Image: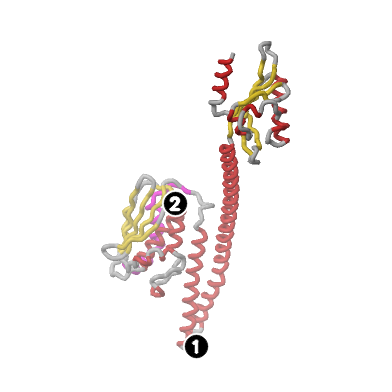
Amino acid sequence: MEIQEQIFSLFVNSIPQFVFWKDRDSIYLGCNNNFANYAGFDTWEQIVGKTDYDMPWSCEETNFFRKIDKEVMDSGKAQLNFEEPQTLKNGETRWLSTSKTPLFDKNKEIIGILGWYVDITDYKKMQIEIGEKNKDIVNYSLQLEKSKDALELAKYDLEKFTYAASHDLKTPLRTMVNFAQLLKRQNKDNLNPSSIEYIDFIINAGQRMNILVGDILNYARTGANELVSREIVLSEIIALKLEDLKQMIASKSAKVNLDLTEKPIKCYPHLIGMVFYNLINNAIKFNESQAPTVNCISSESKDHWLFSIIDNGIGIEPASADKVFEPFKRLAGRAYEGSGIGLSVCKRIVNIHKGKIWIENNPNGGSIFNFSISKHI
């Protein structure tokens, strides 16, 4: 018997768990050294005969411990791995994962309980921190979603306002230009040269303003929310744009060469047509050579189509390569007509197609405008 007690004592004092046992009245009969030290005692003998009310834990904790003791002893069933707090002698509260099982005598009568636990405070703190961080992440995500919705709404309202305002400006502009032209035509013989010059200033300014308003309308229209993508053959839509540019091409004796894929590509056709129109238009407009030439070529990768518009025009300084895509930037000054918004429209359209647009210098003089569009829109 003595040997068995020695073996038991050696075993319970060598394991990392905190072990204790009580009688039917929840009076401590013994414990291992870990439990004694954890409770603030020097030896396990100091705990024998004490109840939980004699221990450093709070009254609420003591009542809970004894409640579980009674449930286990009355039911004869173990309760395993339940979490509970415990206040130590120094006032610190720790978290435990506790198990309790009934103790039986040789007649299979319940004479008490055997309990053991492990300290899971660090795990619990980490669990709480993760929970708090998850709450923060959820709150941040909700705020981000609200901000995104608000931004989309503001963007939508701005686009609608821009479209409406620009559209409404066109009517008085046309009226102003038309009446100025009529005034000049009907009173040409009665006006002195200065008056005719002033009327021409009004007409020219009105026409430039009309172009600007038209470009702003185009910029406002380049949202993908109400668009439907479909497969097209590029040559079909570019042929229509070249027809729109027919007068300019003829007036400058320009040549536009197309070497583009014949494969159907998925895109927003109207928008892609605007990109080619603007880039070809600029390549001819900003060109002082006797034979303006524009070459349009394409290539493909696994995920993108790449297009290049190569001209022999006036070129763009490398330092200004990014600025040309900003709205209303006109690097060539008043020497050329335009609002300076065409390339910003191109950039916005390319962004909608999940691509990018950039400029390179043409080694033979002029510029190379490259843009890509995703195959997965």
Q: Mark 2 — residue?
A: 354
Question: What secondary structure is marked by label 1?
Answer: helix
Q: Give the Cα separation between the discs numbered 2 and 1.
A: 59 Å
Q: Assess disc 2: are there few (<14), some (14-19) or many (≥20) residues with their C-alpha within 10 Å of its C-alpha.
A: some
Looking at the rendered structure, the kind of residue marked 2 is Lys
Q: Please say whether residue 246 is one of the residues in the magenta stretch.
A: yes
166 relative to 113, above or below: below
Residue 247 position, x and y percent, is 38, 66
Q: Main secondary structure of the magenta part?
A: helix
Tell me: 36 left or right of 374: right
Tell me: 69 left or right of 270: right
Query: Which label sits on residue 110?
Result: none
Residue in the picture at 71% in, 24% down: 71
Question: What secondary structure is marked by label 2?
Answer: loop
Residues 232 and 312: in front is 312
Name the front one of labels 2 and 1. 2
Q: In which quarter of the image is residue 366?
A: bottom left
**Mark positioned earlier in the residue sequence (2 or 1):** 1
Looking at the rendered structure, the kind of residue marked 1 is Asn
Residue 317 position, x and y percent, is 34, 67
| Extreme-left residue of the structure | 364
Residue 358 position, x and y percent, is 37, 59
Q: Quadrant of residue 158?
A: bottom right
| Extreme-top residue of the structure | 107
42 relative to 336, above or below: above
Residues 234 and 223: in front is 223
Q: Mark 1 — residue?
A: 190
Res. 286 visible in picture: yes
Res. 115 visible in picture: no
Q: In which quarter of the image is residue 293?
A: bottom left
